Amino acid sequence: MKIYTLGHKIPDSDSICSAISLAYLLNQISYEATPARQGELNPESKFILDRFGFDEPILKTSYAGENIYLTDHSDLAQAPDDIGQSHVVGIVDHHKLGDITTNAPLECWIRPVGCTNTIIKQMYDFYHVNIPKDIASIMACAILSDTVMFKSPTCTKEDKKALNELAKIANIDDPMALGLEMFKVKSAIVGTPIRELVLRDFKDFNMSDHKVGIGQLEVVDISLFDKIEDDLFKDIEKLRLEGDRDSVLLLLTDIMKEGSKLLVSSKDESKIEKAFDKKLQNSRVWLEGVLSRKKQVVPFLEKSYSTT
Ligand code: MN
Ligand code: MN
């Protein structure tokens, strides 16, 4: 069976690497799988593919009539627009269960771990398929990226175990050094157009019928944003109005200080203040210890939106 593997819109390294690692696995177990992507690669993903000698997954945004296996998402807002006309064969994901439904039975690998590639490692073990060295390398990179080098509260023992085993296969002696190299690539923001930064890792959510967009930029030193913070703020206001959104939030995450500065553009800031139980100052607030959008931001916002 011909099938495409693909991660979410505005793909991150987990979405890109999981499309590749899952396609390889499926190709060993009787599918004819092609890795795909729904958007442009970010600098970190480019770095990973260059470093380990992979081509970019093909760019494909329409899947009507195709078989697809989704990775790293189960929300309609992050899936292809015409997913309703495609056949979803499977989902492998580590987010909250989204709103994608199917009209035929599907294979689901959804687990509360820190990275989709951790689950795909478990799939390889389940099917007794050996992981090639280069595939193990990019899977390890995805785990380092998604778990913020194990610092994120989303990181589990299983992620650490998977990374250790993958690093062994890939002959990576010092995974944390590789992780730091990746986050330094991510931190190279000087000279990048503001809108590109805002959208680099951006997701729209439907929260009780309110459209809420949340972006995140992870760097090794938050002072990198000092000169452009006001421009970023102005741009999220613009983005909110352009997209008819209720709110746009941008997390500026310092992975060394382990916290995030939140910039807020909202029709009703009190919803955001209620979510975090913090007063905004000039539409901004520092959130100590917050590294994870999925675990430390989205659930609290959804709760706040559902009760106001
Ligand atoms: Mn992702
Ligand atoms: Mn992920």
Image (cartoon, rainbow, N blue to C red):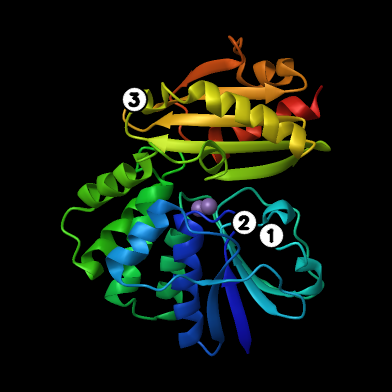
Q: Position of residue 101 (x, y in %)?
A: 78, 63
Q: Amino acid at mark 3?
A: Lys
Reading the image, the residue beneath label 2 is 9
Q: Residue at x 46, y 67 (%)?
A: 120
Give the spatial CA distance, label 3 vs label 1: 33 Å
Q: Quadrant of residue 198?
A: top right
As shown in the figure, which amino acid type bears the numbered disc 2?
A: Lys
Horizontal placement of 261 versus 215: left or right?
Answer: left
- The residue closer to the viewer here, 152 or 247, is 247
Residue matched to label 1: 79
Image position of 1 with respect to 300: above or below: below
Q: Is residue 63 left or right of residue 201?
A: right
Nearest to N terminus: mark 1 or mark 2: 2
Which quadrant, please, contains the C terminus?
Answer: top right
Image height of 155 relative to 86, above or below? above
The Cα atoms of the two marked residues, 3 and 2, are separated by 29 Å
Q: Percent x, y for residue 91?
A: 62, 66
| Pointer 3 residue | 257
Picture quarter with the N terminus: bottom right
Identify which amino acid the numbered label 1 is placed on: Ala
Report the mark closest to the observer, 3 or 2.
2
Q: Element under label 1? A: loop
* Residue occupying the point 49% across, 73% down: 22
The reply to whether callout 3 and callout 1 are in contact (CB within 8 Å) is no
Residue 154: x and y, percent? 46, 42
Q: Secondary structure at mark 2?
A: loop
Residue found 62% across the figure and 87% down from its top:
2
Q: Residues within 10 Å of mark 2 (few under 14, many from 20)?
A: many
In the image, is 155 to the left or to the right of 61?
left
